[in-house]
Amino acid sequence: MKKMILACLLVAVWAVPVRGADLVDAVQKKYESLSGFKAEFIQDLKNSASGEGETRSGSITFKKPSLVRWETVKPEKELLLVGKEAVWDYFEDDREAFRYPVEEIINSKTMLKFLTGKANLREDFHVFEEPDAAGAGLVRFKLVPKEPEPGLVMAHVWVDPATQMIMRLSIQDFYANTNDLTLKNLKVEANLPDSLFSFTPPPGVSVHDNTGADGRTLSK
């Protein structure tokens, strides 16, 4: 599956006002101060209309200010790399690579924007704390945007209060499609080499520049 689920928030939701205000502020400070992190992920995507879903797994590496290596290994290999000058989306089995402008990721409210701390929880959203039946020691928050964008409906984040890091993020779009990402074995890293975030298409790979002609858009 090459299609990525677009994540936005659009409607207001009634909920109990946030009680974990200190934790919300701590999360923001944490992401502003960290240099980078590495984690494994499990990503569950579900299409509301068809009822079909897909589970992906792989790893995510982030280096401040905005370098990202998102590597999916199952069910198919895909490398999404946000570099300094371009974004690459590489499908190894299909031998195809797609190039996008960095601004498309940095300026959009995608899952990557949450994970890299570009989305300001306090300034961009109305935040509500909710009970979490799953427990696991995480604190769950509902997020409703202050400035809605077409295509977004609702988001939830699960925060580890001990580390102030987001360990799970679930986003629902206007059509009730869901994108649920759980992180495991997260480690804060300070010395990640820039070489992790550079990409040169291998010989024989078809390269497609994102000019809009093929109708593709990019979001995680």
Image (cartoon, rainbow, N blue to C red):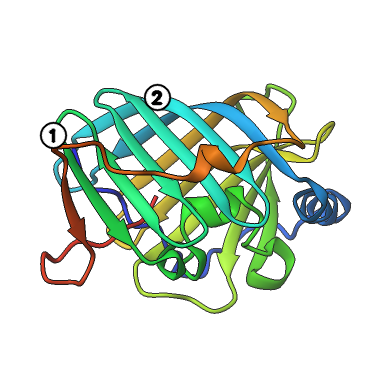
The x, y position of residue 174, in whole percent, is 33, 63
Residue 145 in picture, x, y percent from top left: 56, 70
x, y percent for residue 63 = 64, 45
Q: Could you say which is closer to the camera, residue 1 or residue 97?
A: 97
Residue 213 makes an appearance in the image = yes
Res 134 quadrant in image: top right
Horizontal relation, residue 115 to residue 106: left or right: right
Q: Nearer the viewer, residue 169 or 140?
A: 169
Mark sitting on residue 94 = 1
Q: Amino acid at mark 2?
A: Ser
Residue 9: mark: none
Horizontal arrangement in the rendering, residue 12 relative to residue 89 (left or right): right
The residue carrying mark 2 is 57
Image mark count: 2
Within-10-Å neighbours for mark 1: few <14, some 14–19, many 20+: few
Q: Is residue 163 left or right of residue 216?
A: right
58 in relation to 62, above or below: above
Label 2 or label 1, whichever comes before in sequence order: 2
Q: Secondary structure at mark 1?
A: loop
Q: Is residue 139 above or below residue 121?
A: above
Residue under the image location 56 percent in, 50 percent down: 67
Q: Position of residue 149 (x, y in %)?
A: 43, 75
Q: Is residue 157 left or right of residue 207?
A: right
Q: Which amino acid type is shown beneath numbered disc 1?
A: Asp
